[in-house]
Image (cartoon, helix red, strand yellow):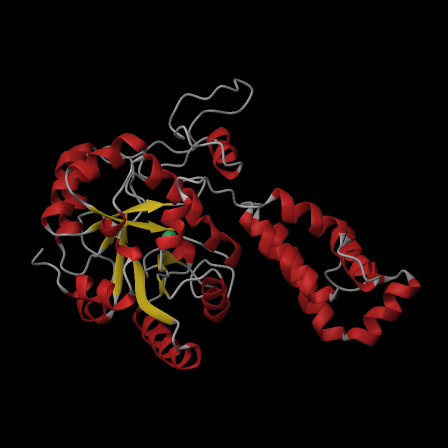
Amino acid sequence: MDPEAALLRVAYLLDRTLAPSQKALAFAKATETVRSIGPAALAAKAADGTLLELPGIGKSTGSVIAEALAGKVPHYLRTLEEASEVPISDAAAPYRAALKGDCHLHSEWSDGGAPIEVMAATAQALGHQYMVLTDHSPRLTIAHGLNRDRLLDQMAVIENLNEELAPFRILTGMEVDILEHGDLDMDEDLLDRLDIVVASVHSKLKMPAEEMTRRMVLAIASPHTDIVGHITGRKVSSAQVTRVLDGLDQAGPDAPLEDPDRDASPKRAQSAFDAELVFAACARFDKAVEINCRPERQDPPDDLLELALEWGCKISIDTDAHAPGQLEWQAFGCEKAARHDIELDRIVNTWDADTLLEWASSHPTG
Ligand SMILES: [Zn+2]
């Protein structure tokens, strides 16, 4: 097996398991070393047993390289391949099959780990016809949010990539921060030019419910907003994360946990707001509520999703992937959709790109 391919695959699979990103990064770094040293020198180092002298090569990366060079599928890779497999139930499979794109994902332009073209190639390999690139907005500095100039640069890059990748399409977008008073964190003229805008709350999640409701409703009412990202901002317990990754959440991830040894305390409480008003606004302005597939988010919780459906809101099943392997997480959102028996045609990313764009440009008339 080619050592470079083996290392890259390990990095991909580590991201799929939600392993700490340093772990995947170590494999990505080792890939760079392997690429720069070249196959002959690498083989010589392996023969001498001195692989670990190379920069960025440690015990795990070294053994993956050595086994690959020996013509084997590395043990570490084989084990991880099985352990990280994303499960999907029979009930959820038709949802996954119906999804034509992913409307919320990040690249290394903000806080993602991969170039746009790698995210696009992965999305395409997973059967998608399009993806919406939604890197963060400027004031989310911790996530290297894009300012006006960088967003413009990114839009130009996407235009070129689309020529290469056709018929696959990268739609332009942004995960725009909903600021404290409900404003969106980007200039109107650029928001107007983007294909799809996901609006999310990232700060002051603990503000009083009345203020949070006003903040969210204002953002939902903005003609630029198309999708509301991770609506409660919650981070679930490690027990719930494990259950989703293991495919055991078909009874509902919000059902009480049976294993008392696992840490069942939420990592971050959901923000408080008047959900009836928020979903009424989404329905009135014809905005989609995101099912965020990230195992640590699983947003919205089941009771709120049910309420959104009662209000007639549209839904978008998005990964919020920050690495290529995470693009497979749509299956987790599909489990949620199946449990709630959501009609396929109200899920906006079961539509083709043109229909999605038509819907987005119809805002705010509803
Ligand atoms: Zn995001």
Quadrant housing residue 177: bottom left
Q: Nearer the viewer, residue 140 or 78?
A: 78
Quarter of the image with the C terminus in it:
bottom left
Q: Nearer the viewer, residue 12 or 55?
A: 12
> Could you say where residue 104 lies in the image, as x and y percent from the top left?
35, 56
**Vertical side of 212 occupied by 42: above or below:** below
**Vertical side of 250 occupied by 214: above or below:** below
Q: Does residue 5 appear left or right of residue 168 in this picture?
A: right
> Could you say where residue 328 lies in the image, as x and y percent from the top left?
48, 52
Q: Does residue 119 appear left or right of residue 220 in this picture?
A: right
Quadrant housing residue 204: top left
Residue 178 seen from this side: no
At x 46% / y 22%, what residue is drawn?
A: 257
At x 69% / y 45%, what residue is drawn?
A: 79
> Could you say where residue 315 lies in the image, as x and y percent from the top left?
25, 48
Q: Nearer the viewer, residue 174 or 340?
A: 340
> Could you say where residue 183 lies in the image, as x and y percent from the top left?
18, 54
Residue at the right extreme of this rendering: 48
Q: Nearer the viewer, residue 39 or 56?
A: 39
Quarter of the image with the N terminus in it:
bottom right
Residue at the left extreme of this rendering: 365
The number of numbered badges drawn on the structure is 0
Residue 345 seen from this side: yes
